Image (cartoon, rainbow, N blue to C red):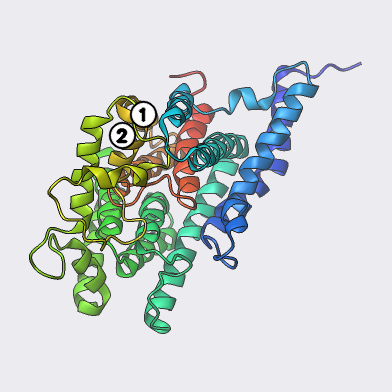
Amino acid sequence: MILKSDADIADSQTIWHQRLYLPIAAIAIAASAFHFWPFGNSRIWRVLNLPNLACIGVLVVQILISISKKTNSPISSSLPHVSVFAYLAVNFLSIAFAAGLFRSVSFTIKLSIVLTGGCVLFSLAAANERSIKTIYYLATVAAATSVGACLFRRFAQATSSFGFFESLYKYGSYIGILVPLGGIYLLSSRKTVEIFLGMVLIVCAYLSSGSIGAVAAITSGLLSALIFNRKRTAKLLVVISLALSTAALLAAGPAFFKNVWDDFKLLETDGKNLRQRYIEWQAEINLLESRGITGTGPGCINDYRSNFYYRLPKLNTLEAFDQNGWLTVAAETGILGLITFCWIIIHYGGTAVTMIFYIDPVREPFAHRFAAAAMAALVSACTANLFSSVHYNGVLIVFVLVLSLISAVNKVYIKGYR
């Protein structure tokens, strides 16, 4: 009788994970590019769309495995960092102070499912270098699909929608995260074709942008690569991509960046009042001063914010999904909620930075590419969160993807290193 070694068991588990979870992760990533299409008006589909269903399904399967097996389930090694659970715990505690109980409970449950289920799904799918490569390519294709659809809808069909995203702000957050992820990954390649495609993706993303949040997010992600990427060639290619994007915007004329310019203005169209966006920010700061401990409850900021305008005018000109995610987290869950959310960013960001300087880009070129691209995406997500929250349904899944990729790369290449 031949007994299997621990290494053989680990290899068989890796193969099993790839066969089961990688296709599910692929579906979730691909479906995210289409947002809520083709059932955008269906409330049920907005909750039970493919990415969310994938998170729910993986959680159910892993819980059943954990119950049925005496040995440790794969879920034990794929759970997100404790900072994620701390943040979710604060959200659940903040429900007690919500004016709308049902809305707060449903928001927190959806947040918990995507944060935990998404991390488990992508961590199990990214079991080795090959599967991590696949996920990066899938994310890049998703970004290209979204950007291509936006350019086609806006300029070929002359519609006001941004591809499959009706909101320019949600679209800005989505591509603001995925374009730096895929773009830096491609620019760090040794293949001329991939480098060329990376430049095309970045230039087209800028041309498709309709909000200052999208431009700021993509730019901050690319600039972070100049700091954290250790490959000089990749740094030079980032500079060239930024130069080409600027030239393309200037050559295209005002029609291509009119939305961005209008979004950048500090005043309303009347030329007198401050943009409602910034008035909302001030109202949230006022709210935080009054309810800094309890918050308003997750998802319930609108129930309280109107009481904190004070002398500031409420113009009702704010567009949907134009929201400062940082201030919203603080206003809804209090200072403790903001601290735990920052803990998530600091932990995963610190892990990515450590990997970038720990991994030799010559000996482990793919590992360095993975870490540099994920770091760029995390920086861009933090920037995008200033203008449209990463918590929004349809955007949260790619934010979780970035966190999971950082964790997976760390697990595969720096075993046991923290």
Instruction: Compare residues 384 and 30 and report the one nearer the observer.
Output: 384
Looking at the image, which residue is at 52% across and 22% down? 415
* Residue 192 falls left or right of residue 206: right
Instruction: Compare residues 231 and 12 and report the one nearer the observer.
Output: 12
In this view, 99 is above or below 414 = below
* Residue 108 falls left or right of residue 240: right
Q: Which residue lies under the disc numbered 1?
A: 337
Q: Which residue lies under the disc numbered 2?
A: 330
Looking at the image, which residue is at 19% across and 47% down? 309
Image coordinates of residue 133 in percent, x first then y, are 54, 46
Instruction: Kindly tell me whether residue 349 is visible in this rendering.
Output: no
Disc 1, disc 2: CB below 8 Å?
yes
Q: Quadrant of the N terminus?
A: top right
Specify few, some or many for label 2: CA neighbours under 10 Å numbering under 14, 14-19, or 20 or more.
many
In this view, 36 is above or below 397 = below
Image coordinates of residue 304 in percent, x first then y, are 32, 42
Instruction: Say which element carries label 1.
Output: helix
Image coordinates of residue 25 in percent, x first then y, are 61, 47
| Residue ranking furthest to the bottom | 157
Q: Quadrant of the C terminus?
A: top left
Callout 1 amino acid: Gly
Residue 108, label in figure: none
Callout 2 amino acid: Ala
Instruction: Say which element carries label 2.
Output: helix
